[in-house]
Amino acid sequence: MRRNILLFLTMCLFCVYAQGQELDTTFISIYPNASWVTGYLSTSAVNLTTEEKTFEPNYPMKIGVGLGIRNTMINFLMGTKIVSLKDKTYGKTSSTDFQVHRYGRKFVTDAYFQRYKGFFALDGKDIKVFSEMKINQVGLEQTYVFNHTKFSLKAAFERSERQLRSAGSFLLGGNVYWHRLRNFEGFDGNFVQNLDNLQLGAHGGYAHSWVLRRGWLISAYGTAGFNIGNDVENFRNFHFKVYPTLLARAVASYTKNDWSFSYSMMINNKLNFFETKKDYTVTNINLQLSVTKQINFSL
């Protein structure tokens, strides 16, 4: 546990980048206020999908607040679980879910440390609970934004700037992921051995923001790529497999003076393989409803 947390914190250090101030002010506007506060409702989950079924956690709704201060490393959200979205017939899930999504001028950085125990799957109308099933995921993605002078990720996904005119950008980046699966049991009752999987890869894609009337902004972000990897022992021996990856984000936001309201989603898919050659997909899903207020507080 301590080693995993140390790995996650070490990866987060790579989120620090010197951001240039160059931008086209006919496309991007910076708020005069140096800070902002955010309140939000969100859900987050890690699912596993095989050729037969999808295994889901009974994940909770979260409520939280956040604070951001421009030109500092202070930009965070803190939340607490308030209620599970499904009743006890779907089992109980315990989880630790830390995520960092940093939207810079030139780079977007995503870091994950996720531990889920307790899943369920549907078999027609029947519910089968897998209380001992565990999925761990540690990951880091780094993506470069080519058209950063006219397209603002901060306006699209952080609401700390405003996109004045529609614009988009090509994206290119790399990533590393480690997955651990424990106590997985298929529907046929056969026990599948524990798995540890390490992947390294690259991805590319495109993001675009559409500036609409009356303060509305619609933004979409998508990347696709491939990883090379294998279980840890084979990885050390340079025996690799190829895994496709896919990530999608979308947000709809409404801005009025120094207020903004938004609904966002993110879906991140990584393909893996059992030793039986059957494939399975680990999917990270995030949904968030938030309100952001620009304020004058600064350090």
Image: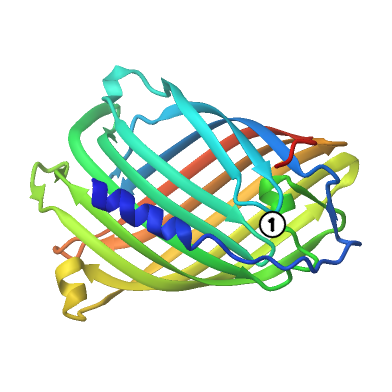
Q: In the structure shown, which secondary structural element does the residue marked by tag 1 occupy?
A: helix
For the point 37% across and 44% down, the residue is: 46
How packed mark 1 is, by other alpha carbons closer than 10 Å (few <14, some 14-19, many 20 or more), is many
Q: Nearer the viewer, residue 77 or 273?
A: 77
- Residue at numbered disc 1: 153
Q: In the displayed structure, would residue 269 be above or below residue 168?
A: above
Q: Residue furthest front?
A: 299
Measured as percent of width and height from the top left, residue 235 is found at: 21, 74
Q: Is residue 96 left or right of residue 80?
A: left
Q: Is residue 265 left or right of residue 274?
A: right
Q: How is the image coloured?
A: rainbow
Measured as percent of width and height from the top left, residue 229 is found at: 28, 72
Q: Is residue 278 left or right of residue 165?
A: left
For the point 22% across and 42% down, the residue is: 134
Residue 77 falls in which quadrant of the image? top right
Measured as percent of width and height from the top left, residue 15 is found at: 52, 60
For the point 17% across and 56% down, the residue is: 195
Can the viewer see residue 30?
A: yes
